[in-house]
Amino acid sequence: MTTETRTMADDRILEPDNIQTPPRYTGDRPQVLTSDTARQGPAGRPVLFVLVASLLGAVLVLGLYWIFWVRTII
């Protein structure tokens, strides 16, 4: 038996998660830990690239639609 972890995705494409330990707590009541308390999304340029490319793609599609729509009116 092997302890090797197999992933279904290509590790060269996916960016590792930015996992941190939960914050310290010294209150009287129990600490509430949600699913995103200790986990953050991936950080870095790939995420920014996807966001910018998506925004530019949406602007391009809407711009082309607007141009064709204006031409049908004229």
Image (spheres, rainbow, N blue to C red):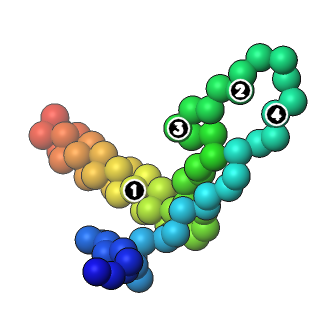
- Name the residue rendered at 28%, 80% in the picture: 1
Tell which tag, 2 or 1, sits nearer the viewer.
Answer: 2
Tell which tag, 4 or 1, sits nearer the viewer.
Answer: 4
Q: CA distance from mark 3 to mark 4?
A: 17 Å
Disc number placed over residue 54 in the picture, else none: 1
Q: Given the image, on which type of amino acid does mark 2 rest?
A: Gln
The residue that mark 2 highlights is 31
Image coords of residue 64 (percent x, y): 26, 52
Q: CA distance from mark 4 to mark 2?
A: 7 Å
Q: Secondary structure at mark 2?
A: loop
Tell which tag, 3 or 4, sits nearer the viewer.
Answer: 4
Circles 4 and 2 in contact, beta carbons < 8 Å? yes
Image coords of residue 26 (percent x, y): 87, 30
Dot placed on the residue nearer the N-terminal end, 3 or 4: 4
Q: Given the image, on which type of amino acid does mark 3 rest?
A: Ser
Is residue 62 something that shows in the picture?
A: yes
The residue that mark 3 highlights is 35
Seen in the picture, residue 26 relative to 74 is either above or below; the reply is above
